[in-house]
Image (cartoon, rainbow, N blue to C red):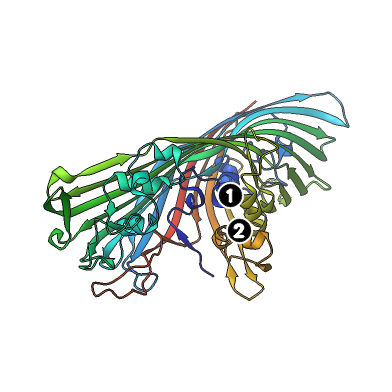
Amino acid sequence: MKKILAAATFLALAVSAGAQNMYDAMTFSQNQYYGTARSMAMGNAVTALGGDLGSVVINPAGSAVAGYGQFTITPGFTLSAVNSAWSPEGENSYGSPNGLSQTRMNLPNVGLSMEFKTGRRSGVKALTFSVISSQTDNYNFASEAFGTNSRTSKIAEFADAAYGYAESVLANYNSFNNSDAPWDLLTSYQGGMYGPYGWDGLYAGVTESIADDASYHYVPGALSQTSSRTKRGSKNDLIMNLGLNISDRVYVGFNVGLPSARYRYNESFYESAVDPGQFPIIYEDMEESYVTYFNRGTYSYDYMADVTGIYAKIGVILRPTDALRLGATFQTPTAYTVSERWQHYASTTFDDSYYNDSQYSPEGEYEYTLRSPYRASFGLAYTLGKAGAISVDYELADYSVMRFSELHRNRLASDAFLAQNLTNRYFAGVAHSVRVGGEFKVTPEFAVRAGYTLATSPERYWTDSSGMTVTADDYADNFYDYYDRVKNLVTPHYYKDRTQSFAFGFGYSSPGSFFLDAVARLTRYPAMTFAPYFDYDSYDKAGNLQSVLSPRVHTDRSLWNVALTFGWRF
């Protein structure tokens, strides 16, 4: 089953107040593990393996396995490659895909561990203390799709959505903070994108013509449209670790994790008249009329989030034989604090620049807390003496426990996040991942490695009592019908989305303390289809209601990661 998302699904539930929806909660909560070049090259299948500072964020007991102290630093870069195909009317006629790439430098891992031997022959033989910074997600993304459209318009959709709002509200800059009007509608109106006609509360876009009897409005010619989206930033966990080596057979570890993320999202949409002469705009001033022609409209939304949190994690590695290792971990939900800022922008240009207009909204800001999923992982590894090792991991994370709350909530007030938290409970479920990795020593100094990861999506949909499909957006739009049991959810279903990673690398270990590892990893994300603006009732030139949908963009995303680890043992 396919998901059709609005371009602003990430913010659609609260356009005037930042994001705070299920998709953002999943964005901040998910882990796409990085680590050292060795751990990445082995697919991060290191729950039972340990011994490497890249493994400690996954299993705290991994720090106790090495038997020595070490320092590592891992510089790298990511390359986002996104192909986007445009369809002007729903999903019926996609054009050729447009490729866009974006490269960012990153630092997947920096770590220091120190081992202190107790001198005992059994029991706790050594303690390991570690401080590690490890990247757990990267948001590098850039896409652009474009085409022509002569039936619908984003500017016209703004005008349609503004129906019923008084012009005195839309025209007043104070309305951003003193009205219930969404900020995108206020910004687009004050940026000159649409205006009133007929009775109060009825609007038409500057990409439309109004019928002679003013009973409808329509797009009179072809528009060149472009949808652009970018994401930047990363999530990094600062780990304070304690590891215990018990009789060289049991390794136990404890982490206090301090994740932090900086996430930047921009969504822009441009539309321009292919032939401005088909888009006359009449301005009336007292008893005189002036005519100009629409050229171009630009709308953008910038969203920024700074995220900090804390969690605890415990892990164990058992070595029942010299070759076999078993590992298990449990991580508590993370308590996040999210600080958001956002801003809208709109501008219009005409043949006569006197009528050009533009507007920035105020910069909005909001803080709230978020509880993320708990996680558990299990691993099995088999070492081949000095020849190498193979390892398999399984990890689960329960996203249904995600919960928003106000930073300073008045407990006597109603829960501002009631609808959203119930949406999380029903439409976010359990995500599963399987990781497989192997290492083979070609010589005592040189090793080759490979790894694979398969991860499922936690997002799900339901069928209701009438057999109809209900998505998270449907539930949110009709929340009180479900809350009051007017409508009922019956059966949950998971989307079949899969994220896959393929990694390959090599390592060199000198006879002394220095070692060097390298990795290249390709991650393929599920294809996604989204709408750059919402569907709305549109008319053709003759006044017939058109049965057409707004444009759709189909994207395929891949992310390359290349990294080098420089390390020293002591």
Closer to us: 392 or 119:
392
Looking at the rendered image, the quarter that the C terminus falls into is top right
Of the residues tagged 1 and 2, which is closer to the observer? 2
State the separation of the CA atoms marked 1 and 2: 20 Å
Mark nearer the N terminus (1 vs 2): 1
Residue 456 visible in the displayed image = no
Does residue 127 lie above or below 160 as drawn?
Answer: above
Q: Position of residue 128 (x, y in %)?
A: 73, 28
Q: Position of residue 495 (x, y in %)?
A: 59, 65
The amino acid type found where label 1 is placed reads Met
Closer to us: 467 or 163:
163
Q: Position of residue 22 (x, y in %)?
A: 58, 51
Q: Give the image quarter of residue 86.
A: bottom left
Q: Which mark is residue 563?
A: none
Closer to us: 317 or 195:
195
The amino acid type found where label 2 is placed reads Phe
Dot 1: few (<14), some (14–19), or many (≥20) neighbours within 10 Å? some
Dot 2: few (<14), some (14–19), or many (≥20) neighbours within 10 Å? some
Element assignment for label 1:
helix
| Residue tagged 2 | 479
| Residue tagged 1 | 26
Closer to us: 458 or 339:
339
Q: Give the image quarter of residue 344.
A: top left
Q: Position of residue 286 (x, y in %)?
A: 15, 47
Tell me what residue is drawn at x 21 percent, y 66 percent. Answer: 220
